[in-house]
Image (spheres, rainbow, N blue to C red):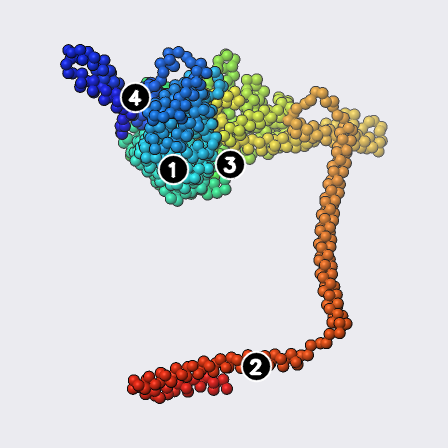
Amino acid sequence: MDFKFGRINLNAVAQGVGGLVFGNENSGSSEDRKRRPTRVLGVVSLVTALGSVLMRTCWVYISELVSELGKRSIWLRFVQWVSCRYSPRKCSGLPSCLRKKKKTSRGWVFYVERLLDRISNGVLADDRRAAITELQSLVAESRQAQLAFGAMGLPVVLSVLKEERDDVEMVRGGLETLVSAMTPIDTSHVKNEVQPASMNSDLLSREPDNISLILSLLSEDDFYIRYYTLQLLTALLTNSPNRLQEAILSVPRGITRLMDMLMDREVIRNEALLLLTYLTREAEEIQKIVVFEGAFEKIFSIIKEEGGSEGGVVVQDSLELLNNLIRNTASNQILLRETIGFEPIVSILKLHRGSAYNFTQQKTVNLLSALETVELLLVGGPDGEPGRDSNRLSNQTLLAQKKILEHLLMLGVESQWASLSVRCLKPNYERFERHYFDRITKIAIFFLDGRVDFLLALRCIGNLVFKNSQNIDALANKMVGEEPHTEPALNSILRIILRTTTLQDFIAADHVFKCFCEGNQSGQVMLASTMTPQPHTVPRGSLEDIGNMPFGSILLHGVLFDENDGDLETSCRAASVLFHIVKDNIQSKERILQIDVDVSVPSFGSREPLLHRIVKYLALTTSTKNKDNDHGTGISPADSFTTPVILRLLITWLAGFPDAVHCFLDSAAHLTYLLELVCSPYTSTFIRGLASMVLGECVIYNKRSGESNKDAFSVVDAISQKIGLTSYFLNFDELQKSLAVISATTVQQRKPLTRSCAASTADMADTEHDETEQKFEHPILLAIFDVEFVDLLKKLEVDIREGIVRVFSHPKSMVAVVPAELEQRGGEPDGDYIRRLKLFVEKQCIEMQDLLGRNATLAEDLAKTGGGVDPSQKPISGRERVQSETFQRDLQEAARRVETIRSEKAKIESEALMYKNLVEKLESDLKSLSDAYTSLEQANFQLDSEVRALRKGGQPYPDVEAIKAQAKEEAEKESEAELNDLLVCLGQEQSKVEKLSARLAELGEDVDSLLEGIGDDAALPEEEDE
């Protein structure tokens, strides 16, 4: 940790030392009495100077402490209080008048303006530094000073940062002043009042040049300048995120400078890391640049340096930055997979079995952040993005190869019931700002009763096996625990569902079975085949003693409900697992339908189908609610969701499976119970809608005919008599309103796991919980009633309406009772009797057809309108209906004719437009040809005029032969002149040769031998030319 001394008043020190030294001589003389004031002043000055040095040293230490521990919520308020109270910049130079009495807004403006004038127009450097120190202290303590600083102070301080870069103290003071001006002051003020810090941030970030200037300060060598610059950027990002993001993107190499800070000293690295996490939450362009600058390598380097999951809050910030980069971008996930790989992520989740349960609070948060990273990779990207499924499959395969399933099972399954010593955390557990809870997906971390539930690990297990056959097989064959106490992983997850006391555990474990059974037909049949009833040798509540049972037997043991124990909620949770096994699988439905269980009352028989037992549990849930309502007591949370969960199982089981419908109707009490459930005033609209769906399935999937009270017509007749078709169809409308809440909630994404939103998460969770209970039955239903089940209900509603119309159109029987008046009268001839019978039959047939038609019409109208009746409308007679239908057909025919005429008109218009374009093209071609013809005519006329002029002018034609002779003569003259020049040159060369020959002869050379052959070589070209 570096300690840097602040400015020391050397004059005061020298004066104090001098006073002490020279004041020791002649202490008793008169001169000594004159020196006493100087001595006293020297002592005071020395003490003041040394105190200032000591104070600045402590302030540096506090600043370092802020950077090291200020991020930790447990130390945050203490460090801020100490920093605010004992900052030397805040204690030095602040007038006592401002601390003793409250200044008006005009007084603050005057004093801030005076300090700014000293900074901009001051002559002495020390005075300007003192002024900026006082301004920083003033702005840090008063909202009025921040408001006054606004437009006046920003240009002055920015000019200091721009023009006085050599003065480190001034630049540092300017940055501290800006940080204080952008930091909100928590004081009691009017609600919705404009915050000066937000206004100052808006003014500063409005100009991109200001952000460019601030980013340029990151290249300074001074440690504190870089530190305060990062703090200023963080404050700006908090108040004006959009503008700052746009400004940073507009600055060349702006993101690159921030990324370089990750390789700086630890304090600056942590500030830069925190700033990048804020920047990359929603800005996709910044995410791409950060990834391009090698963010993945730097992130994992920091995590490794800090100790992985055992590290502090820096590891959490690093993982948060990583999650921001891969959350909504599949390309970044692919880059991470192909460059770094998933081994660093998996290594964070590695736990040694001996120390697997030694979780501290920060380690728990780090593990949750790493689990969120794994979940983002397993999702594969945002919905609707091309290539999401292939990316998800690749991530699942690579993570499975890294043995992540073992670590997830260690966190999510084997640590579910492990004790954790958090005694040091319990006293302040309510003050934790990192208490994460999400009501939508029910993924939470709980520090309750010394236990930590890693629900996110269970969710990651489900996403790991979702539509991945290899991972599904791996999970089915996986064993957990230590020898000899091992069991299949699916059995352990099922025990979590059956034994848990919290709904969040149930939802997380139920998600595993949902993903395991999704599109896994063979896996569903395998689980269903293990469901065999076991003898009653194990007590109902002793789930720990059934370790040797197969999966299906444990599930069946959980489904079966003992009235003496009253554990109906466990049966409900087991029914939810059974729902996933029978979903869209006829073989599983048939296998489970054949299961018979022992009846609770021996006098009623020896055994009964499992379906009948489940319907019995449904009746028990509603009867419990009715008793509670009669006694005026509240309904327990378990009772509020057990009925919908069991109804969900029945709807899925009966869908497309007539055998289950027949088994359901074999007991007449079942139909009667459902009718009473729909009519009950204590039943909510959501449950009435689900029960109406079950009744509708008994109509559309009922293949029986002619059996009393068991065929489709009997069910429809019972609905019409007990409920009424109007009320029955209105239940569907009310159900759709409730389902709209599920669809809207499912679209919402789970909030990221961040430090900044931790403080408000608990309050938001309570608010969401209250709103959810008002709009919906229970928050657990938002998690288990997924989009696929909602789509099934919508499809069933259409089929049920159409099925009821068909039943009304085709009555149960065509048997008619012959009246006594149709008997042959005495003495009546046979012919008259036959004619009378014929007329009677014809009349009955006409009336019957009219009744059938009216019945079908009414059923169709009722099915389309949902049973709504407007009392202001008058009933329409049959004749008027026929006329209305005739007019409607005529209107439709006329509309078709108009449409045909319009199409023909459009076709004719298109052809006319085509011909028009063709004519315009031909006209342009004709015009071009006309212009060419005109130009040719003009050229021809000009030539003709020249010919006529030549002929009429009287000028003789030139003599060609004379011209040729003249040209030949001129050529000969030119050749003769050139030949004369050549001869002159040859003469000159000959003279030179003679002189050279004479000289060679004087030297004794044989000139003839040297010149031999030279003339012959020169003659060869001439001979060849000849």
**Distance in Å between CA atoms under marks 3 and 1:** 55 Å
Q: Position of residue 574 (x, y in %)?
A: 44, 28
Which one is closest to the eye, mark 3 or mark 1? Answer: 1
Could you say which disc has been placed on residue 164 in the image?
A: none
Mark 1–mark 2 contact, CB under 8 Å? no
Mark 3–mark 1 contact, CB under 8 Å? no
Of the pair 297 and 627, the residue shown nearer to us: 297
Which one is closest to the eye, mark 1 or mark 4? Answer: 1
Could you say which disc has been placed on residue 257 in the image?
A: 1
Disc 4: CA contacts within 10 A as few (<14), some (14-19) or many (>=20): few
Disc 3: CA contacts within 10 A as few (<14), some (14-19) or many (>=20): many
Q: Earlier in the sequence, mark 4 or mark 3?
A: 4
Q: Earlier in the sequence, mark 1 or mark 2?
A: 1
Question: Which residue is denoted by mark 3 in the rendering?
Answer: 584
Residue 152 sits in which quadrant?
Answer: top left
Tell me which amino acid carries mark 1: Arg
Question: Which residue is denoted by mark 4 in the rendering?
Answer: 424
Q: Position of residue 404 (x, y in %)?
A: 36, 38
Residue shown at the point (70%, 20%) measured from the top left: 871
Could you say which disc has been placed on residue 972 in the image?
A: 2
**Distance in Å between CA atoms under marks 1 and 2:** 87 Å
* On-image quarter of the N terminus: top left
Residue shown at the point (83%, 32%) measured from the top left: 835
Tell me which amino acid carries mark 2: Glu
Q: Earlier in the sequence, mark 1 or mark 4?
A: 1
Kindly state the secondary structure of the residue where label 3 is placed.
loop
**Distance in Å between CA atoms under marks 2 and 4:** 126 Å
**Distance in Å between CA atoms under marks 2 and 3:** 114 Å
Which one is closest to the eye, mark 2 or mark 4? Answer: 2
Q: Earlier in the sequence, mark 3 or mark 1?
A: 1
Q: Earlier in the sequence, mark 2 or mark 3?
A: 3
